[in-house]
């Protein structure tokens, strides 16, 4: 125990003093597996983070708040985001940009853009010269695309996440509205790329909420499907989703995991808290104009309109909890104040046409899921707009049951997305929870077919991903009647359930155009080898983010393989072909099984459709949801002649894919946007560095002036040093507030370094005088402990105890010398230091003391390690006649082994092995503590010397010569 206490004491004290010597702590980002999620709404954004050892949590912003306004402002060359940007938006509304999300991927002629102009008339919106997308323009120099603005919001979210985790973060999961089409999703991915973020997945907001709910109710999920409806009213839109929870066993991995699957979706992209707030804004504006305090129409003043908008938002929140309240704005217009009482009844009257619309998404979700309210376990609310009492009353009247309010309305989507981020990241292992989302806008393939008999060209459409099909999912479609180059389109399919305004908001209904080239040449080249033409197969993939891709096109046919070619094949190759055949058949069965389970099959070119009713052939229909084979592969099939084989050949077809919706930012436009954002970031970094340098210099000047007036610090500086420091501080303070033309951070940093060099003289002396007593006390404690240890160690030398010679006399003398020298040095230096004043140069420093402690610590640790590894030498065993005495262990051996030469030989080998083992153990390290080991060994030896009378056996009566 003594050596353990000493070891802890020496190491602990030394570590404590070394920590004391650290002057200024600094924070650095370390490489880690931390990931984040961003719930990017139209009005707010929330950031979720997860890092090793830290549970999922919300990252706070600079104001220590859990959500940040999704608004960005530029004024006087300074970029601000969040609450500061909101403040600028009141003073100069044209300089602050908000409610941007639904403008992604939209051209300026889109109805959503027209609605945005109507709601916020003070913005100047122009079309991009190449893509005709939304560009905000202010003056002749300032222009920002929607992607650039959202990229800066995402970069700020990344900054908050990194400050929260103190780690670098590059991977994220982003939430998106479920009604986002291909154009919007692609545009958001580009914005994330501009922010230097790798998007692991785009997850629909209702799917993220459903995942969050399922994770915290995992114990309630079983093999029986449970149905829930999640209702969301946010700032900009309202949506509803019917989902099912069920434990499902995977057919391939045999694992059993909970699955949440989206079954039905409904939405209204223009119904939300923003619309209610705008109704209040317009009402307040009309009431102010009715007062006729000024001839100017308040709606013509952007600043007054922004003030009314802000007050309308505050009023909406207050009236959600109170029956009446006052709207009050100081200096609304031309120095006129405005005050007006508003009741909740009046608010409900203003929005009378909105309340019936609140139930439409819920009804659409139920209709698309083919379920009724009877089987829904609960309707769960989330989103800030659901706090409006009239919204809850309207929904409750429809469903006739209590509403679920056990979710965090603001953060549930963020937490679900960050759980998904942890699942997708390679740095975490979470409990598996499978999410299956559903297709909102169906996708179909459209192409033309020439019957070849001189008839009219037929327009054929095939459903590729039907509405509410689960995804991610892969599909294959086969074209087996085309003999020349052709093209096909992938478009949005049946949209009859959506209104004309909603279809117009989607933009282009064409998604992709695929052109196949060199088809005729390919067919001619392989014509002589073909036994069975399986056609041209196109492969499609709808990934986890809802992004559609045509992943490849191949020409597939069966070719005869001759008997001579088979003979040349190795046995291993034949075996591989057989196995490939087996797996191919099994895969076909699996694909058929999946089709029967409800996945929409992809009909072939000859399959019947709404425009033609030609009778399909057996080989004309094919659908697959399995993985696409990227490289040509071969399978064998037996023909009538057993020596003839068929091999399937897959040859890539040259093709080009062209996006037909609003093209995402790319090429020179992307490079220009990236350069613009990097330049803005550099200016902001310089500004922050300049402000930090200015504040650091200002703070240090005040600190030095204040401390020189305090006795403990003032005593550590000479009169000359004090005078020089005060003069320098006074000079710098006067200079600091002068107008400096084009100031640079280096200017303030250099002046701070010079001042610190002067002030550190007396500050270091003060630190030494304050810390020295604790250091001396620690050194004395180490000396006292070392002396006690040495007293015990003197009894473990060969001279004092030959049987316990752990240490040599030289080692004891060395430790004694170090202790004596340290004692003498300490007394001398302490006495010399006491003769000096506090303003003199320090003689006995904390560094000198810790150096002495290190030397003493090293010597004691050496001796402690030696006793840990020491073991007494084993004494050679003396053989005694067996007929007289033997050890207790030997008796047991004889009694059990009986007589015979084999037994005696075995005993001899056992004795030799034991002797060898004892010799090795004498040299090997032992973990026994101090001298107690030797005492225990001595007791064992005394026990072994005790003799007992052997039990008479045949061996005992046998002469030694015969044994």
Image: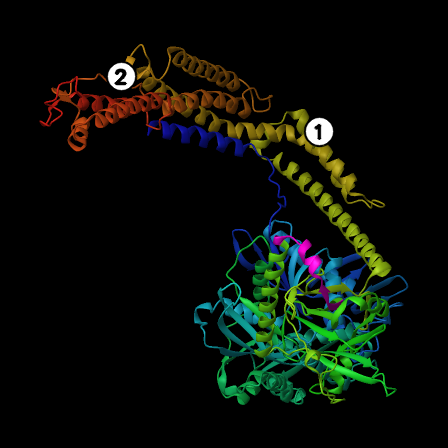
Q: Which quadrant of the figure has residue 787?
A: top left
Q: Write the residue at 27% across / 26% down.
A: 910
Is residue 494 shown above or below 702?
Answer: below
Answer with the quarter of the image where residue 9 lies. Answer: top left
How far across and down, in percent of the image, does residue 571 sit? 61, 53
Q: In this view, does 810 lie to the left or right of 932?
A: right
> Quadrant location of the C terminus?
top left
Task: Give the vertical position of 739 relative to 797 (above or below).
Answer: below
Give the residue displayed 33% in from the left and 15% down from the top.
Answer: 805
The residue positioned 22% from the left and 28% from the top of the image is: 903
Read off the residue under disc 2: 876
Q: Is residue 788 left or right of residue 403?
A: left
Q: Residue drawn 67% across and 42% down?
A: 699
Say which element carries label 1: helix
Residue 141, image x and y in percent? Answer: 89, 61
> Under tag 2, what secondary structure?
loop
Front: mark 2 or 1: 2
Q: Can residue 150 be seen in this view?
A: no
Which residues fall within the magenta stretch? 554-572
What is the crowding at mark 2: few (fewer than 14 residues within 10 Å), some, or many (at least 20)? few
Q: Residues within 10 Å of mark 1 (few under 14, many from 20)?
A: few
Residue 293 occupies which quadrant of the picture? bottom right
Mark 1 = which residue? 724
């Amino acid at each position: 125990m003594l050596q353990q206490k000493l070891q802890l004491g020496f190491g602990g004290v030394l570590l404590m003093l070394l920590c004391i010597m650290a002057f200024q702590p600094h924070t650095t980002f370390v490489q880690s597996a931390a990931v984040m999620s961003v719930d990017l709404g139209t009005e707010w954004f929330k950031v979720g983070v997860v890092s090793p050892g830290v549970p999922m949590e919300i990252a706070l912003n600079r104001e220590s708040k859990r959500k940040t306004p999704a608004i960005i402002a530029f004024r006087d060359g300074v970029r601000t985001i969040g609450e500061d940007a909101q403040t600028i938006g009141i003073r100069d509304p044209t300089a602050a940009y908000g409610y941007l999300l639904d403008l992604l991927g939209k051209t300026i002629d889109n109805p959503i853009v027209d609605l945005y102009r109507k709601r916020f008339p003070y913005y100047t919106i122009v079309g991009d010269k190449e893509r005709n997308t939304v560009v905000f323009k202010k003056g002749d120099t300032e222009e920002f695309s929607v992607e650039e603005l959202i990229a800066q919001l995402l970069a700020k979210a990344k900054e908050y996440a990194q400050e929260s985790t103190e780690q670098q973060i590059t991977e994220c999961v982003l939430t998106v509205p479920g009604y986002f089409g291909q154009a919007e999703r692609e545009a958001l991915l580009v914005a994330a790329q501009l922010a230097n973020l790798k998007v692991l997945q785009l997850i629909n907001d209702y799917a993220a909420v459903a995942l969050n709910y399922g994770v915290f109710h995992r114990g309630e999920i079983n093999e029986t499907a449970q149905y829930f409806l999640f209702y969301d009213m946010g700032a900009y839109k309202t949506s509803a989703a019917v989902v099912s929870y069920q434990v499902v066993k995977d057919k391939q991995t045999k694992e059993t995991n909970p699955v949440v699957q989206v079954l039905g979706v409904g939405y209204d992209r223009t119904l939300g808290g923003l619309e209610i707030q705008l109704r209040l804004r317009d009402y307040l504006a009309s009431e102010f104009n009715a007062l006729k305090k000024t001839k100017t129409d308040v709606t013509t003043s952007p600043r007054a309109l922004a003030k009314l908008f802000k007050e309308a938002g505050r009023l909406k929140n207050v009236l959600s909890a109170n029956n009446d309240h006052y709207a009050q704005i100081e200096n609304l217009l031309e120095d006129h104040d405005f005050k007006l009482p508003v009741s909740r009844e009046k608010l409900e009257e203003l929005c009378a046409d909105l309340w019936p619309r609140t139930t439409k998404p819920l009804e659409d979700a139920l209709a698309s899921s083919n379920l009724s309210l009877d089987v829904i376990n609960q309707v769960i609310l989330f989103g800030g707009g659901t706090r409006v009492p009239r919204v809850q009353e309207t929904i409750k009247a429809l469903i006739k049951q209590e509403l679920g309010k056990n979710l965090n309305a603001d953060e549930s989507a963020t937490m679900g997305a960050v759980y998904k981020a942890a699942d997708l990241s390679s740095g975490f292992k979470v409990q598996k929870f499978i999410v299956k989302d559903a297709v909102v806008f169906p996708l179909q393939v459209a192409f033309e077919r020439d019957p070849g008999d001189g008839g009219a060209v037929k327009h054929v459409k095939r459903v590729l991903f039907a509405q509410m099909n689960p995804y991610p999912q892969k599909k294959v479609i086969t074209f087996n009647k085309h003999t020349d180059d052709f093209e096909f389109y992938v478009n949005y399919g049946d949209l009859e359930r959506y209104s004309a305004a909603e279809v117009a908001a989607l933009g282009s209904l064409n998604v992709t155009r695929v052109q196949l080239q060199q088809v005729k040449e390919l067919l001619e080249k392989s014509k002589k080898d073909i036994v069975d033409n399986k056609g041209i197969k196109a492969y499609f993939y709808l990934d986890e983010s809802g992004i559609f891709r045509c992943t490849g096109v191949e020409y597939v046919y069966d070719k005869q393989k001759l008997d001579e070619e088979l003979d040349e094949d190795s046995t291993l190759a034949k075996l591989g072909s057989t196995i490939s055949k087996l797996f191919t058949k099994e895969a076909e069965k699996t694909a058929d099984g999946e089709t029967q389970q409800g996945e929409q099959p992809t009909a072939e070119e000859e399959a019947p459709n709404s425009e033609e009713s030609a009778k399909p052939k057996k080989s004309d229909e094919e659908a697959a949801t399995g993985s696409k084979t990227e490289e040509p592969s071969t399978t064998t099939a037996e023909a009538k002649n057993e020596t003839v084989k068929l091999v399937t050949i897959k040859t890539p077809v040259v093709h080009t894919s062209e996006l037909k919706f609003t093209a995402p930012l790319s090429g020179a436009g992307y490079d220009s946007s990236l350069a613009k954002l990097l330049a803005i970031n550099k200016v902001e970094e310089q500004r922050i560095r300049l402000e930090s340098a200015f504040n650091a210099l200002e703070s240090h000047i005040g600190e030095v002036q204040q401390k020189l007036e305090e006795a403990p610090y003032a005593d550590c500086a000479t009169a000359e040093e004090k005078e020089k420091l005060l003069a320098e501080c006074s000079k710098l303070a006067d200079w600091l507030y002068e107008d400096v033309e084009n100031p640079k951070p280096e200017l303030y940093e250099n002046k701070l370094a010079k001042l610190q060099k002067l002030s550190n003289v007396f500050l270091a002396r003060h630190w030494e005088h304050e810390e020295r007593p604790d250091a001396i006390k620690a050194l004395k404690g180490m000396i006292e402990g070392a002396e006690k240890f040495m007293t015990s160690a003197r009894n473990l030398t060969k001279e004092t105890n030959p049987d316990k010679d752990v240490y040599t006399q030289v080692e004891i003398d060395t430790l004694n010398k170090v202790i004596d020298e340290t004692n003498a040095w300490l007394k001398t230096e302490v006495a010399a230091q006491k003769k000096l004043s506090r303003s003199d140069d320090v003689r006995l420093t904390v560094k000198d003391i810790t150096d002495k402690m290190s030397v003493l610590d090293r010597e004691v640790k050496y001796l402690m390690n030696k006793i840990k590894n020491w073991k007494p030498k084993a004494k050679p065993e003396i053989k005694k006649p067996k007929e007289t005495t033997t050890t207790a262990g030997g008796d047991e051996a004889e009694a059990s082994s009986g007589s015979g030469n084999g037994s005696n030989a075995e005993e001899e080998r056992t004795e030799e092995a034991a002797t060898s083992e004892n010799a090795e153990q004498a040299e090997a390290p032992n973990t026994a503590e101090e001298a107690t080991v030797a005492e225990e060994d001595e007791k064992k030896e005394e026990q072994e010397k005790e003799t007992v009378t052997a039990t008479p056996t045949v061996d005992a009566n046998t002469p030694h010569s015969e044994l």
